[in-house]
């Protein structure tokens, strides 16, 4: 098993990879937004559309005592959100072909959620 160091990973260009994996943490999101299951499901549809993804169906949205989770399958990927109410944090995850502009999907969430801070990371996959 080969484990790459951070320096080795940083040297890989995203364009050389088949897929990209974007993760984002939206910190300080108001509770009313984090508990709004229809909003979160709708944001996934809007984010997918903005980035030019083809949806494979409608979002699956589940409410539970600690928050809300939603996922939508894409052609060769997915978008998901997980609202961690006790931490006022919303996690966003996107895996799809690297040919798409993931920033457009991220912009949709950034404009609609009033987060105090957003931290992101994008890596090549495959």
Image (cartoon, rainbow, N blue to C red):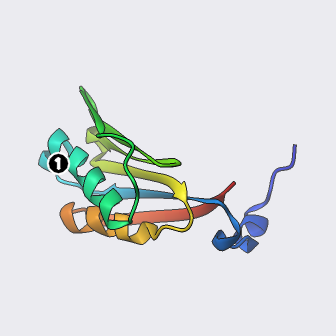
Q: Please state which of residues 40 and 52 is positioned toward the viewer in this rendering.
A: 52
Residue plotted at (32% across, 37% down): 69
Viewed as shown, does residue 122 lie left or right of 65? right
Label 1: element kind: helix
Q: Is residue 36 visible?
A: no
The picture places residue 44, in percent across and down from the top left corner, at 30, 51
Quadrant position of the C terminus in the picture: bottom right
Single out the residue that lies furthest toward the right: 1
Residue plotted at (73% across, 70% down): 12
Residue 6 quadrant: bottom right
Single out the residue that lies furthest toward the top: 65
The picture places residue 39, in percent across and down from the top left corner, at 17, 48
Vertical relation: 85 (above or below) 45: above
Q: Please state which of residues 42 and 114 is positioned toward the viewer in this rendering.
A: 42
The picture places residue 122, in percent across and down from the top left corner, at 55, 64
Viewed as shown, does residue 47 lie left or right of 119? left
Q: Residues within 10 Å of mark 1 (few under 14, many from 20)?
A: few
**Residue for badge 1:** 39
Vertical relation: 60 (above or below) 43: above
Residue plotted at (45% across, 71% down): 101
Residue plotted at (39% across, 43% down): 56
Q: Is residue 68 visible?
A: yes
The picture places residue 22, in percent across and down from the top left corner, at 50, 59
């Amino acid at each position: 098993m080969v484990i790459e160091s951070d320096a080795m990973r940083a040297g890989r260009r995203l364009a050389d990879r088949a897929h990209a994996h974007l993760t984002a943490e939206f910190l300080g999101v108001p509770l009313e937004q984090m508990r709004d299951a229809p909003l979160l499901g709708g944001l996934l549809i809007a984010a997918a559309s903005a980035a030019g993804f083809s949806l494979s169906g409608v979002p699956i949205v589940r409410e539970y005592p600690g928050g809300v989770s939603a996922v939508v399958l894409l052609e060769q990927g997915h978008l998901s959100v997980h609202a961690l109410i006790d931490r006022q944090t919303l996690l966003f995850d996107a895996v799809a072909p690297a040919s798409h502009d993931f920033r457009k999907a991220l912009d949709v969430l950034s404009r609609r959620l009033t987060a105090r801070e957003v931290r992101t990371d994008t890596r090549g996959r495959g």
